[in-house]
Image (spheres, rainbow, N blue to C red):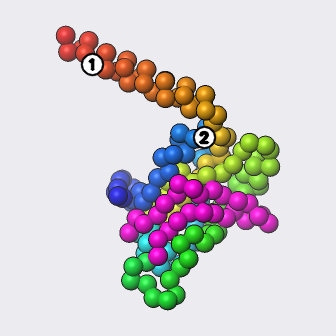
Amino acid sequence: MSKQSEGGVRHIAANRKAQHDYFIEDRYEAGIALTGTEIKSVRAARVNLRDGFVQIRKGEAWLVNVHISPYDFGNRENHEPRRERKLLLHRQEIRKLQAKVSERGWTIVPLSMYLKDGRAKLEIALVRGKRLYDKRDAVAERDADRDLARALREYERE
């Protein structure tokens, strides 16, 4: 499930549905405050970002509705799988996100979770929702690009 890449970054989970459902405007890297059993579950790649989103309350960013499975070898002090987790961002970034989210149609969603130098990081994005016809256009464009690439490969073989 997780991939090791250069620079000490190990990808844990990705929200592939976000690319399909939203137009991505800005991306941010945020730290995430986790308990001991949560980080162990993250290292085991037992994370689901699909339904997650970020709320900003009282000048703090909170990750909501992200499922981190309970640690298999934890005891009764194991964590709640869908608890709200605090995101670690600079104050200026939080203010900028707050200003955009207060406008109609904008939201913040998690795109991916990874370990960077042993610390859990979350890539979040400021997004605007796609309508059904936008999704159809994106699928049609992707299919056209695939057909064009296939035709070019065929042409180069001849």
Distance, label 1 to label 2, CA atoms, is 31 Å
Tell me the residue at 53%/51% (across/down). Answer: 111
Q: Position of residue 138 (x, y in %)?
A: 53, 29
Q: Position of residue 136 (x, y in %)?
A: 54, 28
The reply to whether residue 154 is in sight is: yes
Look at the image and tell me in which quarter the N terminus lies. bottom left
Give the structural element (helix, strand or loop) at label 1: helix
Image location of residue 29, percent across then percent down? 57, 55
- Front: mark 1 or 2: 2
Asked whether residue 88 is in view, the answer is no
Q: Is residue 101 above or below residue 137?
A: below
**Which quadrant of the figure has residue 51?**
bottom right
Identified at 43% across, 77% down, the residue is 71
Q: Amino acid at mark 2?
A: Tyr
Look at the numbered discs 1 and 2 and tell me whether their residues touch, using CB distance below 8 Å.
Answer: no
Give residue 59's quadrant in the image.
bottom right
Range of magenta residues: 44-70
Place residue 135 in its image quadrant: top right
Measured from the top left, where is residue 149 in percent x and y? 35, 21
Which of marks 2 and 1 precedes in the sequence? 2
Residue 137 vertical position relative to residue 10 in the rendered view, above or below = above
Q: Which mark is residue 22?
A: 2
* Up/down of 133 relative to 99, above or below: above
Residue at mark 1: 153
Q: Which residue is pictured at 73% across the width and 65% down the height?
A: 60
Residue most toward the left?
158
Left or right: 99 as drawn, with respect to 120: right
